[in-house]
């Protein structure tokens, strides 16, 4: 009598007691604590020393009212907000297209948007100058018409857009990808137009990622230095943002440079803290 061979028995999964698992976690934390503390100290101590030095002098308010500081603050605020508006207006549809559509060259476009993240900012400045400078590929046609971009406030904004846009597009793309496409299809089926679908379904659901990306993008724009000095120059009141003012002040007024650097550190920390809070409040972005 033939017997049907029984299927091979699967190996039993070894059960690990909660006590051993907890002990393993404690051991891993203890093992990794030393390099973690070293890294935190390496990053945190210089920043802490900068902030403490700025407040220890006692003339922080006086330094904040210096013309060079006020000018740099005003220009950085103006250009960073303007660049952020451009990034949101252009980057939002780009992110949605990358998240929802398949088309020829999609991967190339996706990679191209990430290139500024890896390029040295000085290279970005040179590239912009070769295109939009007075003798650039496009600039040579604009200059006879009285349109000059390089070494103007507009150049500062364009440099910031170039280096900061990928932060917003990446985050917005993730946000749009996490929105269930079936919800959009249902909205269209019920008679919603494309704009209504985006306004009432897609945007509200992707809002945390959009806001988080905007915060990171603004922080990167405020701290931009290399591309700005190459493409826009360092002219007080016109192109001298806070990072450029720090470099200039280091040559003659160390305390002013410390105050400006402290303001940048605090602004960046606040922006990143807001980004983390958004992630915890509305889910990971």
Image (cartoon, grey):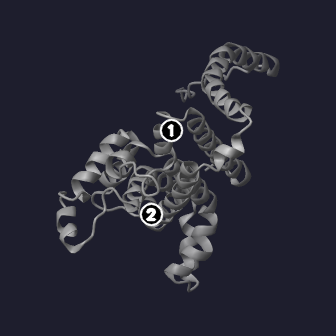
Provide the secondary structure element on which disc 1 rests: helix
Q: Is 88 displayed left or right of 123 in the figure?
A: right
- As rendered, which of 200 and 74 lies closer to the eye? 74
- As rendered, which of 256 and 102 lies closer to the eye? 256
Provide the secondary structure element on which disc 2 rests: helix
Residue 50 is drawn in which quadrant? top right
Q: Identify the residue at horizontal 61%, vertical 50% (top origin).
A: 285
The reply to whether residue 186 is visible in this rendering is: no
User: Residue tagged by mark 2?
Assistant: 100
Q: Residues within 10 Å of mark 2 (few under 14, many from 20)?
A: few
User: Residue tagged by mark 1?
Assistant: 249
Residue 58 is drawn in which quadrant? top right
Cα separation between marks 1 and 2: 48 Å
The image's mark for residue 21 is none
In the image, residue 15 above or below residue 129: above
Nearest to N terminus: mark 1 or mark 2: 2
| Front: mark 1 or 2 | 1
The reply to whether residue 18 is visible in this rendering is: yes
Q: Verify CB contact (< 8 Å) between mark 1 and mark 2.
A: no
Q: Position of residue 169 (x, y in %)?
A: 47, 56
Q: Position of residue 119 (x, y in %)?
A: 35, 40
In the image, residue 280 above or below residue 16: below
Q: Position of residue 20 (x, y in %)?
A: 77, 16
């Amino acid at each position: 009598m033939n017997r049907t061979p029984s299927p091979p028995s699967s190996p039993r999964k070894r059960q690990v007691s909660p006590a051993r698992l907890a002990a393993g976690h404690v051991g891993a934390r203890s093992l990794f604590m030393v390099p973690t503390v070293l890294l935190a100290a390496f990053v945190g101590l210089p920043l802490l020393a900068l902030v403490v030095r700025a407040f220890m002098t006692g003339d922080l308010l006086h330094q904040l009212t210096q013309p060079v500081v006020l000018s740099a603050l005003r220009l950085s605020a103006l250009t960073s907000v303007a660049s952020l508006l451009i990034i949101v207006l252009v980057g939002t549809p780009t992110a949605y297209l990358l998240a929802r559509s398949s088309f020829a060259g999609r991967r190339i476009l996706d990679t191209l948007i990430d290139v500024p993240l890896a390029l040295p900012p000085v290279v970005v400045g040179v590239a912009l100058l070769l295109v939009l400078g007075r003798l650039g590929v496009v600039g040579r046609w604009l200059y006879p018409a009285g349109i000059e971009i390089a070494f103007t406030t507009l150049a500062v904004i364009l440099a910031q857009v170039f280096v900061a846009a990928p932060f917003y597009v990446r985050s917005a793309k993730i946000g749009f990808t996490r929105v269930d496409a079936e919800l959009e299809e249902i909205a269209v089926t019920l008679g919603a137009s494309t704009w209504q679908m985006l306004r009432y379904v897609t945007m509200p659901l992707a809002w945390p990622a959009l806001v988080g990306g905007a915060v990171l993008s603004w922080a990167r724009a405020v701290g931009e230095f290399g591309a700005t000095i190459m493409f826009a120059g360092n002219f007080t009141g016109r192109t001298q943002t806070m990072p450029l003012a720090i470099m200039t002040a280091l040559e003659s007024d160390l305390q002013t440079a410390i105050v400006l650097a402290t303001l940048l550190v605090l602004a960046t920390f606040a922006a990143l803290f807001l980004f983390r809070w958004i992630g915890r409040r509305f889910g990971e972005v």
